[in-house]
Image (cartoon, coloured by chain):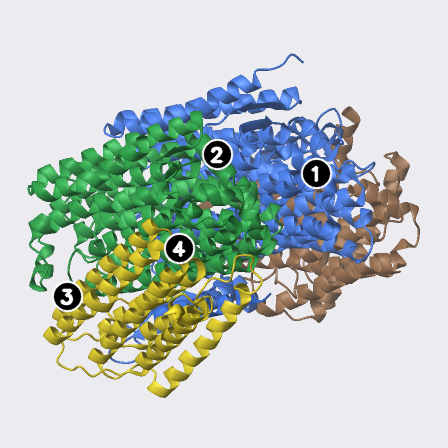
Chain colours: A brown, B green, C yellow, D blue
Amino acid sequence: MIGLLAKAGLQLVLVLLVAPLLSGIIKTLKARLQTRRGPNVLQSYRDIFKLLRKGMVIPETASWIFSATPYIVFVTAALVGLMIPMATTDAPLSLFGGVLAVVYLLALGRFFLALGGLDTGSSFGGLGSSREMTLSAIAEPAMMLAIFTVALAASSTNLSEMAKVAVSQSWKFLAPSQMLAFAALFIVLIAETGRIPVDNPATHLELTMIHEAMILEYSGPYLALLEWGASLKQLVLMTLVVNTFFPFGLSSDWTLRGLGLGLVFYLIKMLLLACLIVLVETTNAKLRLFRVPELLMVSFIFGALALISTFLF
Amino acid sequence: MILLWLLIVPLAASPLAFFLRRRHLMEAVNLAAFAVLLCLAAALGVRLLRSGPVSVWDGFFYADALSALVVLLSAFVALVCSIYAVGYFRHDESSGVFKEGEELGGGRAINKLREYYALTPLFVFSMILVALANNLGILWVAIEGTTLASVFLVMFYGRETSLEAAWKYAIIGGVGLSMALFGTILTYYSAHQALGTDTLAGLNWSVLVGNASQFDKPTMRLAFILILLGYGTKAGIAPMHTWKPDAYSEAPVPGAAMLAAGVLNCALYGLVRFYILSSKCLGQEFASHLLILFGLLSMGVAVPFIFASHLLILFGLLSMGVAVPFILVQKNFRRMLAYSSIDHSGIMVLALGFGGPLGVLGMLLHMTFHSITKPLLFFCAGNVQQQLKTDLFREAKGGLIHSMPLTGAAFLMVTLAVTGAPPFSLFLSEFTILRAGFSRGYLVLTILFITFLVAIFSGFLIHIANLVLGPDPGLPSAETCRWKKSSVVGLALVIIVMGFWIPAPLFRLIQHAADIVTSGR
Amino acid sequence: MTFLQDPEFGDRIITLMAALVLVLQIAAVGQRWLVSSIRIFAVQSFLLAAIAGIIAYFNHASHIYVAALLTLILKAALLPWVLERLVRRIEIRREIEPLINAPLSILISGCLTLVGYVVAQSFYHPEETSVRAALGHNTLAVAIALFLIGFFTMLNRRKALTQVLGLLSLENGLFLAAISLTYGMPLVVELGIFFDVLVAVMILGILVFRIREAFDSMDVSKLRKLRE
Amino acid sequence: MNTLPVGATFTLSVALYLVGALVSLASWRKPALCRYICCGSALAGAIFGGFAAVFEILQGTPVRWSISSGIPLFAYSFDYDALAGFFNLTLAILAGAVSIYSFSYLKEFEGKRNIGFFGFLFHLLLLSLTIVFTAANAFLFLIAWEVMALAAYGLVTFYHEDRETRRAGLLYIVMAHIDAGCLLLGFALLMQVSGSAAFASFRTAAVHLSSSQQAVAFVLFFVGFGIKAGVIPFHIWLPAAHPVAPSNISSLLSGVVLKAGIYGMARIFLDGLGILPSWAGLLVLIVGVASAVLGVLYALMEHDLKRLLAYHSIENIGIILIGLGAALVFRVAGHPQLAGVALIAALFHTLNHAIFKCLLFLGAGSVLHSTGTRNMEELGGLIRPMPVTAFCFLIGAVAISGLPPLNGFVSEWLTYQSLLAGFGATGGLTRILFPLAGSMLALTGALAAACFVKAFAITFLALPRGAKSSLVREAPRSMLVGMGCLMVACLSLGLGATWFLHVFDALTEQLLGQRVGTNLITGSGLVLSAGVRHGGTVSTAVIGIGLLVLLIPAVLLVSIGTRRFASRRGPAWDCGLPGLTEDNEYTATAFSKALRMIFSVLYQPRREIQTVFDVSPYFPKAIHFESEIEPTFEKRLYVPLKDLLLRFATRMRAIQAGSIHAYLAYIFVTLVLLLLFGVRP
C-alpha cells in the first residue's frame, strides 16, 4: 500500500512538472519552424504561476458549476496521469483503471468544461461547448476502434498489461494493424488536444476557437488550473500513443536505474512525437468546422482497417 | 314439467301485456315474466346436471345440456334487456322519438309500447322453443317465429330507414330460412332412408343422433350446406350478414340487444345440432373445412367492415407528428356494434370449425361470455345515443365521461371486454380457441385469427376512446334514470366478476354441452 | 276406371303437372304484368295441390290430403286474392320489368334447371333404393329448379310485391320437394310450416303497404339510404 | 440458510397493492386523505416487495407456489426465482422512490383531478408488474401483461382533455395489444409443443422444438417483447406516450414497464426456447446497436425535456440488448463464463437505467411542476431557484452518459469487456461485429454526453429564457426526498458496484448454469474484473477516492491566488455591446445544430425563415424561424402502410352499398357455388 502511494506521488510530481514543459516546448518548436524566436520553453510555467497569483473575476450569471469545473478538469487529468505507464510498464493506478477508464475520465472533464462554458450565459461559451461535444462525439468511435485493436493483442484493457505485452513482442509496431491504429489514434490525438487542423489553440477568433471559447470567462487561479489541466491531458494522450505503439525503453520495475533510463527514453520519444505534431500543425491550415467530421471519418476507417487486419494478416 | 312452464310463462306474458294498456303494468308484467323465466332456466340447468336430459310429451320437448345453456343465456339476456327497456322507453317517450313514425302511418306512442311489450315475450317464447324443440321441423318453425316477431321490432320506429331495414331483414331472413327448410327436408329424407319410419319421431334429434352414421352421405353433405347457409343467415355470418348493420341500427336498443345476443345463440344452436349429425355421418373433415371457411370469411368481412366502416386503421394511429391522422370516421356507432356481432359470430363458427374438445369448448365458452358482454355494449351505445340525440360520431364531440361518467366508464370497459382484452372472460374463450387452432395444426389460420382480433380491438377502442374521453363539451348530466343505471352497473359487475370467477355449475353445464357436441351422446 | 288405381297413370299425370309448373315458373320470370304473375302463381299452387292429392291417393298417405287441401285453399285461392286486391288498391302502374332483360333471365333460369337436375341426380337414386319406387320420384329435380328460379326472381325483380311472389314460389318448390322425397314432413311440421308461410306473407304485405305509403312507390331499389 | 419468508413478504406486498387500489378508489371523494392512502400503501407495498426480492436473492433457491383460480383449466402459479427477484428489486426501488415523490406531486391534483382513480391505476400497474415478473404459467403472464398495458394506458391518458394525449394513449394501447397478440401466438406455439401452460414445461419441451418452430417462436417473442421494450423499428409509441403521462408515471413507465420487455426476453430466450441459434443473438445485437445509435441521435434533436428522456430510454434499451445479444451468442458458442459477463452487463444496465432514468424523469417532473412547461427553449437559470433538483438532475445526467465513478459507467464498462471478449470467442466474419458494436456504443455514449450537456445547461444554467422560468420556487420537500433516494442509489451502485455483483450469482447459475457474479470481484472486494486472467480491471471506488485526494493540491494551488485578492463578480465579456441579455444565450436548437448538419442524411432537416418587414428586408420587424427534422420511421414505414390499409378498407366498404338485389345476389352465388361444391361424388 505504501509503495503504491510513493509511486503515485512520484508519478504525480513527474506528470505535473513535465506537462507545462511539453506544451512550452511545442510552442517554441512551432515558432522556430515558422522562423520566429518564439517564447522561452519555461514560459508556460511562468504563465501558470502568474495566473495563480492574480485575482479572479466570476461572471454574475455563473453558478457553482462554473467554479467547480476547473477543479474537476485538473483533477481528472491528474488522476488519468497516474493510470498511464510513463517511465515504467506498471503505472501506479493501472490496476484500478484501464484504457476505458482513461477515456471516460477525460470525457468527464470535457462534460464539466462544456457545462462551465455554457454557464457564463454568453454565446462564446455555448459555441465552444457545442463544437467541443460534437467533435469529441465523432472522435469517440475512431478512438474506441484503435483502442480495441491494441487491447485485443493483449486481450485486456489494462494499460500496464498492454505495455508489458508490447514490450515483450519487439518490432511489433511494424505490423500493419499497429501502424493503422497509430494513424487513427494520432488523428484523434490532434482532435482531442485541439491542435491546428481541428482547432487553433492560440487564437480568440470566434470562427475558429473551440477549446478557447469555453475557457474565455475564466481568469486567475481557475484559468491556471484549466491551462494546467489541458496540458496534462495533452501529456496523457501523447504518452498513451507513445507507450502503446513504441514501447522500447520502458523499464519493468521502479528501481532508480530503471526509472532514470526509462525516463530518458520517455522524454526522447515525447520530443519526437512533439516534433511530429508541430510538423503537422505548421504544414496544415485549420479545417472548416464541417470538414472535420470527414477527417475523423478517415481516422475511423483507419481504425476499422486496423481491426480487420489483426485477423487477416 | 319445467319445460312446459318455461314455454307457458312467456306465452302468457304476451297477451297479458297487450290487454293491460297502462305502461307501468306492462313493464311490470314483462319484468316479472322474464325474472321467473330466468329462475326456471336455472332450475332446469341444475336438474339437468343432476339427472341428465329432461323430456316431456314423449320426446316432443327435449332438453339436454346444450339446450339448457341456450335457454339460460336467452333468459338472462331477456331479463337484462327488459330492465334496460323500462328506462330506455321512458326516455324515448319523453324525447318524442315516435313523432316521425306517426306521420308515416305508424301507431301513437302508447300502442307502440304495447306492441313492444306484447311482441317481446313472443320473441322470447320462440327463442326458448328453439332450444327445447326436439323435432328439427319445429326447430325451424321456432326460428321462423323469432324472425317474424323481430321484424316488428326492427320496424318499431316506423321511420323510412326502419322500413328499409325491416324489408331487407324480412326478405333476406325469409330466403335464408327457406334454405334451412330445404336442408331440414333433405336431413329428414336421408334419415327416412335409414329409419324408414313415417311418424313424428322421424325428425326428432334424439332419435336421429343415435344412428346418424348410417345416413345417406351425399344427401347429408347437401343438407349441411343448406343448413349452414340458412341458419348462417340468421346468425349473420358473411356473406349473408348484409341485413345485420341495418337491422341493429334501426331497432330499439333493447330489441337490438336481444337480436344480437339471443337470436345469434339460437341460430348457432340450430347449426350445432346439424353439425353433430353431419360430423357423425360425414366425419370431422368436411364439416369443419366449411365452417372454417365461413368463420374466417365473416371475420375477414367483419374486420374490414369494422375497419372500413370505421376506417380506423391500426397504423392510422402511427402518423404521429405527420399531418392530422386520417381517420375516416364511422358515421354511426350503432352500426359498429353490428359489425362486432358479425365478427363474434365468425369467431364462434371458426371455433366450431376448429372442432375437437378444445374448439367446441372454446365456442360454447365464447357463446356464454358473448351473451353476457354484448348487451352492455348495446346499452351504453343506447345511453349515448339518447344523450347526444344522434348515433353519428361526427356529431358527438367526445368528452362523454364528464356528462355520463358511469356510462362512459362502462363503455370503455365493455369495449375492452368485447374485443377480448385479457382481464375479461372473452380472452379465456379466445385463448381456448387459439389453442384449439394450434392443436389442430391450423398455424396460418390462427395467426390470421389473432391479426383480425388485434385489428378489431384497435379499430373499436380508437372510436370509443375518442367518443368517451376528451374535453367537457358541457352537456347536461344524463345519468338520471334509475333503471338504465342499474342495468349498466349490474351487467358491468357481472362481466368483471366473470373475468376472475366462473360459477362451477355453469362451467359443468358448458362442459356437458361440449361433450354432447364432440361425442354426440 | 281401372286406370284410377294404375300407379303408372298416376306417375305420368304427376310428371306432366310438374313439367307444367316448371314451364309456368319460367314464364313468370320473363313476365311483364304484375297481375298476370299473381295469376301464374295461383295456377302453380293449384297444380301442386293436385300433385299432392294424386300422390296421397295412390300411396294412401292420409296426411298428404290435409297438406294438399291447405295448399289449395291458402296458396291457390286466398293469397292470390289478397295480393290482387292489394295491387288494385295501391298500384297505378301495373307494368313491371325485371333488372336483367327478359331473354337473358330466361336463359339463366334454363341453366338453373340444369343445375337442379345435376343436384337431384347426385343424391337421389330412386332406382336402387330398397323401398319400392315411390310415386312422383322424378319431381325432385323440378322442385330444386323451382327453388332456384324462385330465388332468382326475387333477385331479378324491382317491385316489392314480385319479391314476395318469388319467395312464395320458393316455398312451393320446397313443398314439392318434401312431397316427392318423403311424402311430406310429419303433419305437425307441415302445419307449422304453412302457418309460418302465412304469417310471413301477411307481414310482408303490411310492409309493402307501409313502403308504398312512405316511398309512394313499390320500387325496392329506391331503398338505399342505409349504406356502409 | 434458513428459509427466509420470501413467500410471506411477497403475498403481503401483493395484498397491500390490492388493498391500496380498492381503498384509494373508494375514498376518491376526500382528496387529501386519498393522497396519503395512495402513496402510503404504494410505499409499503414497494418496501415489502423489496424485502421479498432481497430475501430471494440472499436465499438463492426459487420459491414456487400456486393458488387455484376461480377459472377452471387455469391455475394462478407463481415462481419466484433469481431473475424474478432481480426485476422485483428494480420495481421495488423505483416504486418506493416514486411513491415518496408522489406525496407532494399529487397535491396539485387535489382540486382538479380524481386522485382515487389515479391511485387505483397506480396500484394496478405496480401489482400487474409484480405478477408479470413472478408468473409461472403463460395464462397468468398474459393476463398480468395486458392489465399492465391497460393500467399504463389509463395513466398515460390521465390528462385526457388534450388531443395529443388521447392520440398518444391510443397509439400506446394499440401497439401494446399488437405485442400481446404476438406473445399470445408465441405462447400458443410453445404450449402446443409442451402440452401445458407452465414455463417449467416450456423449459423441458424446448428440446423437442424443431428448428423452424424455434425460429418462428423466437421471431414472435422478439417482436412482442421488442414492441414493449421500445426497440427501434417499433419505438414510435414511446416518445409519444411517455411525455404526456404525469411525471411520476412516466418515470415508472420508462424505468420499469419498458423492462418488462427485457424481462420477457431474458425469461424466454434464456429459459424457455432452449439454445437459440447464433443468428438470433446477432439479430438482437444488431437491433440493439441500431436502437442505441438512432435513439440518441433522435434525442439530440428534441427540445421537449420529457421527449428527450423518452428517446434516451430507447438508446439505453439498445445498450441492454447489445449485452443480451452478446450473451446469447456466447451461450451458443459454448462460453458460459463470457455469457455470464454479458448477461450481468445487460441486467446491471437494466437496473442502472431504471434508477437514473427515473431520477431524470422525476427531475423533469419537478421542473414541469414549478415552471409549467417542458420546452427547454423557455427554461434556463433554474439552478438558482431549484438547487437540489438541479444537483439531482446533474447526477442523473452524469450517470446516464456513462461517466465514472457513477453506475452508468460500470455497466457500460462491463458491456465493453464482453464485446472485447466477443471478438476473441466467436469465429468467422461475425467476429468483426463485436468491436464495431463497441465503437457504436462509444459513439452513443459520447452523443448521450453531448445531449445531456445540452439538456442540463439549457434548462438549469445561465439566464432564464422565458417569463415562465423567471419567478420559480423549489419543488416541494417530498419530491426532493424521492429524487434524493435515487441519487444516493446512483452513487452507491456506482462506487459500490463490486458488492452488488453477488446478486447475480444465483441468477447466472439458474439461467446459464455457471455462477459468474462473485468471480468478477478481485482486489479485496474493491476491483471489478472482466473475468479473464490479466483482463481489464476497473475500480470506481479507487477512482472516486483518487478524485477526492487530488482535489487537495488543486484547492491549495487556487488558495494562493484567492488569499491575496478576493474573487469579484463582474459582467461576462459582451464584446462591448450594452450588456448581455438572455437573448445572447445559446439555445437548444443552436447547440444541436452542428450535429444536425453532420447527420443531415438521417435527419433530412427542413428550415423555414420568414422575415416580417414594412420598409425594407434589411430592417425586419420580426423573424419567424421554424426548423423540423423528418420522422423517417413514420414517413417511410408506418404512413405508407396505413394508407395501403385505408385504400383497401375504402374499397371493401362498397360491399354494403345498400341495394337489396346485391345482397340477395351474394347469397344466391354462394348457394349455387356450394351446391356444385357439395355435389361432386
Quarter occupied by residue D613 = bottom left
Residue B25 image point, x, y percent = 10, 37
Q: Which mark is residue C210?
A: 3
Q: Amino acid at mark 2?
A: His
Residue D528 visible in the picture: yes
Q: Amino acid at mark 4?
A: Tyr
Q: Which mark is residue D205?
A: 1
Side (left or right) of D267 relative to D309:
right
**Disc 2: host chain:** B
CA separation in Å, label 1 and label 4: 43 Å
Q: Which residue is mark 4?
A: B231
Compared to residue D275, the image places residue B35 above or below, namely above
Query: Would residue A48 be visible to someone looking at this image?
Result: no
- For badge 1, the amino acid type reads Ala
Q: Residue A24 is drawn in which quadrant?
A: bottom right
Which badge, 2 or 4, comes first in the chain's sequence? Answer: 4
> Viewer-nearest of labels 2 and 1?
2
Q: Position of residue D5 (x, y in %)?
A: 56, 15
Instruction: Give the residue at mark 2.
Output: B512
* Tag 3 and tag 4 share a subunit: no
**Front position in the image: A114 or B434:** B434
Q: Quadrant of the C terminus of chain D?
A: bottom right
Asked which secondary structure carries label 3, the reply is helix
